[in-house]
Each structure stands twice: as structure tokens, then as C-alpha cells.
Amino acid sequence: MDSAFPIKNAFFDVSFSSAVEPIFITDPQGKLLAANPSFADKTEIDVAEAIGEVPTILKSSLMGEDFYQTLMRSLTRRGHWRGEAQFERSDGTLCREWLSISSSRNADGDITHFIGYMSQPLNEHYYDLLTKLPNRLLLQDRLDFMINHARRNNDLMALLLIDIDRFKYINEAFGYDTGDTLLKTIAERLHFCVRDVDVVFRSGDDEFAVVLEEIGNLEDAAKVAERILNTCSGAMQINEHTVQVSVCMGISIFPTDGDCKAELLQNAETAILRARELGYNTYQHYMPSMNTRALERLTLENDLRNALNRNEMIVFYQPQVEISSGKIIGAEALLRWKHPDLGMIQPSRFIPIAEDSGLIVPIGEWVLRTACMQAKKWHNAGMPVIISINLSAKQFNQKNIVAVVESALKNSNIPPSQVELEITETMSMKNPENTLKILEKLKKLGVKIAIDDFGTGYSSLSYLKRFPIDTLKIDRTFLIDIPENSRDTEIVKAIIAMARSLNQSVIAEGIEREPQAKYLLENGCSMMQGYLFSPPVPIQEFWKLLDEQKFRL
Ligand code: C2E
Ligand code: MG
Ligand code: MG
């Protein structure tokens, strides 16, 4: 061992010399101070001759300048570097090694030397032939190592799994050559999205993995995820095809989402499934609540199947008032579910489940019949309150929707002009030609049509003109900050003006404060609905509101 090497200790000498792993020690400039026999065997370097020189493993032309700059930066800033290195042996053959280098400092904090070792030779079976990336086997192998390291240093670490959306379809549509090229392209682009020290793996057929070590916080992982989404999606020119590509991502964090390799992988997979559920081109963090949430959803869906025949569904009514007269002119029917164990459940929690499972169709029909019957009672009592009933997209697109509405009108014997059907702006514009056809048929029955949540979707003005609409309901989100927010007041004024020119009435939803109401009144919108007047209430209470009719500002 060279005398410049400061560690003098018999035990160290023996372990160093007899270690199976190739080990080398350099000075802060990378010049070789010492290396063990195993290193000599591996690299074919004559150690005695190479002392004082930078060894090929630290200056290989196969890796490029950037690689070594990053390596040095990591060594000086973080004290270590780990990754894959390729270099030529002195006989010209190629060597590819997993290399780990740490820096050692003296009491003043100056780097005195670097210690490097090569952990087990990397066989071809650790690599994916197509993309040349390390494969799932190596990911499994390295994860243990990285987790231990993170645990020792109290670091956060993120595992990102990246899945190409509809890869099977791309393969079938454009051929396997294109599929292969796409995989290579994604592999290259992923390298651009991560730091040089981060390793990208091909962890499955159309799945990649990135491990981000030593992240400062969760946002760091999210930033990389965003970058990946931006870089790996959109139209890509692959061979002679233009392919629309998007990816889904699941993220799990050590130690919060898992303390071991199996847990981290499992939870990142769960997060991918969740991202996929939310649509293409998204990412999700794993959340422990995910499994519980899936379970809760399943239970709720089961309970929902029986909710109607167990009489657990209740319709609440919220008054729609005309401020200029102070009178209740309408009521919106809003569904509530009185769950036997969970108590009163709001629509935001169960309507999406009802939509997905199709249960919204019978439930919606029940609301329609119940609300029409109720409105008939008001009518009989000499209070012609228009009943507003929400239709879900699923319901609206049922073939028999017109017949169902007709039957509810007949059964209750309510004058059709006393019934208003609400469809949301978003659903009306999904397939506007179809919407137009259905609306015209419904209109023939004599009912009124309202566009709900107006302003939240993207309306085509030409359709808005052609649809037989009676009422626009301005969405609550535009009204929350009026009159203080001048952007919102401009939008609201524009909606009011537009409705007037299209001969439609406007109603403002979610009014909670007097200044909001005053502003609307002054600007030509006199119909309002919101907590300022009354929340949705059970039918007995609604009767009381009807008796009082005291809604003035
Ligand atoms: P929506 O049709 O836009 O109903 C208005 C929502 O705003 C109601 O929520 C109502 O309680 C709430 N709201 C009213 N005034 C105020 C206010 O001043 N401030 C605030 N913050 N909120 C106010 P709800 O009852 O929770 O219903 C939510 C959504 O669920 C409804 O939005 C509607 O899309 C859906 N929904 C409710 N009942 C039915 C139904 O029978 N069928 C269908 N398809 N959907 C329904
Ligand atoms: Mg509504
Ligand atoms: Mg609404």
C-alpha cells in the first residue's frame, strides 16, 4: 500500500486486501492511492503502475464529461455517488459495473480521499436488451440497498412507476416495431426528466421506474412527476407514425408509504391504478386511505342497491326566491341518503357512485316521481312553485328518458310548465347534437329546461342559442367573491346580458351574503338560491317557508 495513504491499521489492511469486491482509494483529484487485488483482477490494471494516475474507471470516454462532473458534484456535496459506470479494460474489453464511491473528510471538513467499490458484477440478465435500461430484477436488488441507505441517513426517497397508456393498443395499431421504438424513446426522455444521479429502470413490459433518492420533500417528487408527464406525452413521431402518447404514474414515498421494497412497490402500483381511474396522463401519490377508500366505496355501492326499497332516500327542497317580490317561485329537489349506520350522506359522496354503477337511473327516476308528486301538492294548495329536478348524464342519455318524464308528469297530474329539468352545462355539451334532439322532445312535453352549473363548462354559443333553454343557473364559484372581485363581476354581468339576449332567465346559485344579493339585484338578476335564504330542507320545513314568504333584502 502506498505510503501516502493515511489509514494504517492491520485489520483494515487484511479486509482491504482480501475483500471480494473490487475496492480503490484515490486522492481528492481522483488519482489512485491504493486498490485491492480484486480491483486489479476486474480492471486488468496494474495497480503498482497506476498509483498516482486517474484510473480508467474515472475517466472513461464511454461515459463523457457530464457524467464525471455530476459524479464529482455529488461526491463533494453529498459525500457519495452511486450508479452504473462503463469503461474499457486495458485489454480493450468492455466492463460495466455498479459503482459506489464515498468521500472521506478530515476534522476540518476537507475531502482527504475517495473510496470506491464495485458491488457485484452486473450480468446481462439485469438489463433490458431493448432499452439498455436496468430491469425489474435490478430494481428489486437495488431497492433494498437504497432503502437501507435512506433509513440510515433519515432521507426521504420516492419510487415512481410510469406506465404508458394504451400501450397494447399502440402495438396493435402501429405494429411491434413502433411499440419498441416508443419504449426506447420514452426511456431516453425519462433520462432528461431526472437528475443525472437518478437511475431509470424498465420494470415491466410498458412500465418504467425511477427511484429518487434524498428528495427534500414530497413536492420534489411531484415536480419530477410533472416533468415526466410533460415530456412523455403528446404527439410523438415514432418511425413513420405520429402516435399520441400519454403516461400514468404512481408514486410511493419511503418511509411514509412503506418501510420495505415490497410495500413501496405494491403501493406505487395501487397509486397507478388510482391515476388510471382518474383518466390518462395523470399521476397519483399513494395514500394509505386508498385501500380503505376503495373498500368504503364498495360497501357504499352495495348499500346503495338497497337504499330505495329500504326507504333511505329523502328529497330535500331548497327555495328559489325572487328578491324583487320576496316570493318563493321555485324549489330545487336535492337528494339525501339517510344511511342506517353512517347517518345523513350528502350527494357529493354517493351520486358519483350511483353514476358509475348505473344506480342513478332508478334513483333519479324515483326523485323525478317524488318531486313531481310534491309539486302537485303545492299546486293544489294554491302555491304554484316550479319544481327543479336534476338529471344526471346517465339518466339523460337513457333511451326512454322522454317516456319516463312523461309518465312522472301523468302520474302526478302536475301541469308540465311547473316542472323544470336541470342538466349541467358540461353534460349538455358532450354531444350537443344528441342533447338538442332530447331537449326538443322534452320541451314538447311542456316542461322547462335549465342549464345547471353554468360557466364551469365550455359552451358553444351556437348550441346555447339552438337549445330550447328557459333558465341559466350561474354557478356558485363565480358568485362567491362578488361584488369584491372585479373579474367575477364582469363574468356575471356578461352571463346576465347573454341570457337576456337569448331570452332566458338567470338564477344565481349559492348566495350566502347580502352584498352578493344586492349586487345581483342591481345588475338585473332577481332570482336567487342559497343559504342566505335557506339551505335545502325536509318537506315539512319547506311548507313553513312557503307560509312565511318573507324573502326581502
Ligand atoms: P347542484 O344541482 O348544483 O345543487 C346545488 C348545490 O349547492 C346543492 O348541494 C346545495 O345544497 C348547494 N347550495 C345551495 N345553496 C348554497 C350556498 O349558499 N352555499 C353553498 N356552499 N352551497 C349551497 P347538494 O345538495 O349537496 O347537491 C350537490 C349536487 O349533487 C347537486 O349540485 C347536483 O349536481 C347533485 N344532486 C343532488 N340531488 C340530485 C338528484 O336528485 N339527481 C342528480 N342527478 N343529481 C343530484
Ligand atoms: Mg342543480
Ligand atoms: Mg348547480
Image (cartoon, rainbow, N blue to C red):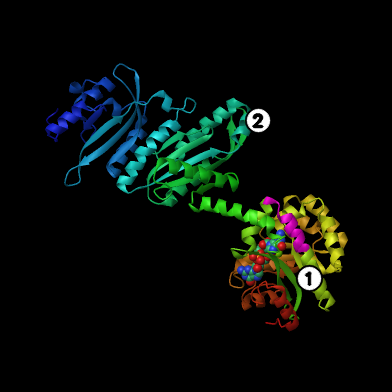
- Identify the residue position indicated by label 1 in the image: 374
- Check the image and report above or below for 11 versus 355: above
* 295 and 241: which is toward the camera: 295
Mark 1 element type: helix
Which mark, by number, is residue 444? none
**Quadrant, the C terminus:** bottom right
Residue 354 located left or right of residue 123 = right
Marks 2 and 1, how far apart at CA? 55 Å
Amino acid type at circle 2 is Ala
Amino acid type at circle 1 is Gln
* 496 and 344: which is toward the camera: 344
Image quarter where ligand 1 lies: bottom right
Residue 128, percent from left and from top:
46, 27
* 534 and 528: which is toward the camera: 534
* 391 and 551: which is toward the camera: 391
- Identify the residue position indicated by label 2 in the image: 173
**Quadrant of residue 360 within the rendered picture:** bottom right
Tell me which label, 2 or 1, sits earlier in the chain.
Answer: 2
Residue 311 located left or right of residue 343 = right
Mark 2 element type: helix
Residue 62, percent from left and from top:
37, 26
Residue 510, percent from left and from top:
65, 70
**Quadrant, the N terminus:** top left
Q: Is residue 4 visible?
A: no
Residue at figure coordinates x 33%, y 36% from the top left: 82
Dot 1, crowdedness within 10 Å: few (<14), some or many (≥20)? some
Segment tinted magenta in the rendering: 357-368
Q: Is 364 part of what is drawn in magenta?
A: yes
Q: Is 316 part of what is drawn in magenta?
A: no
- Check the image and report above or below for 315 versus 44: below
Total marks shown come to 2
